[in-house]
Image (cartoon, rainbow, N blue to C red):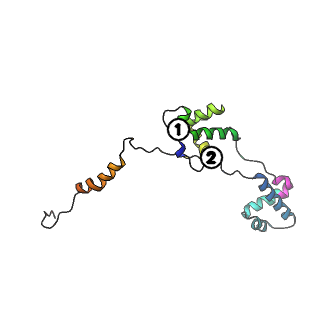
Amino acid sequence: MGKAAVYGLGMSKPRDHAALEQRRTKAGILFNKGYSAPEVARRFGVARQVAYRWKDAWEQGGKGALASKGPAGRKPKLTGEQIHRVTEALLTGPAAQGYKTDLWTLPRVAALIKDLTGVRYHPGHVWRLMGANGFSCQRPERRAVERDEKAIRRWQRVEWPALKKRPAGKGGPSYS
């Protein structure tokens, strides 16, 4: 994955848990005022099932039941600063990191992450990390270095039409 293979770099936008909690709290206040779950769902643009879940939580535990529990899942191994360092190193290219070819492979990226951060990733998991940070898998073009575009165009325009089989004209042999 060289410089040319990186498109649309950027992190995916994380959820704003505080804003989501605030929305649920406002819904709870409406439930307190006697609004129905379908009405709350319409006002907040959510599915009725979501509003019913919020209503049940509000009735059972009040405001605390609608509080944000934070992001789900395992905590990331790399900090934002570490991800930034790895991204910068990837953008400089494999040659700048001491590799002979200008091609990033998953084992190479895993080794780079280990060297820069001390965090070990299995090469089979590196592609998820790369995708989450805006990188995509690219295949290198398989063209000869010696390729002569001018000679290829001339062959296509001049020599190939001369070699093409032409239909027989009048008086030619017929095989039907």
Q: Which residues are magenta?
A: 58-70
As drawn, 76 above or below 44:
above
- Is the stretch drawn in magenta largely helix, strand or loop? helix
Where is residue 138? Give x, y as percent.
51, 46
Query: What residue does disc 2 label?
Result: 132
Q: Residue 105 — which label?
A: 1
Q: Secondary structure at mark 1?
A: loop
Q: Quadrant of residue 66?
A: bottom right
Determine if residue 78 is in view: no
Q: Is residue 22 left or right of residue 167?
A: right
Number of disc labels = 2
Q: Where is residue 26 shown, x and y percent of the image?
A: 83, 61
- Residue type, label 1: Thr
Mark 1 packing: few (<14 Cα in 10 Å), some, or many (20+)?
some
- Residue 14 sits above or below residue 118 on the image: below
Q: Residue 106: where, in percent of width, then height?
A: 54, 38
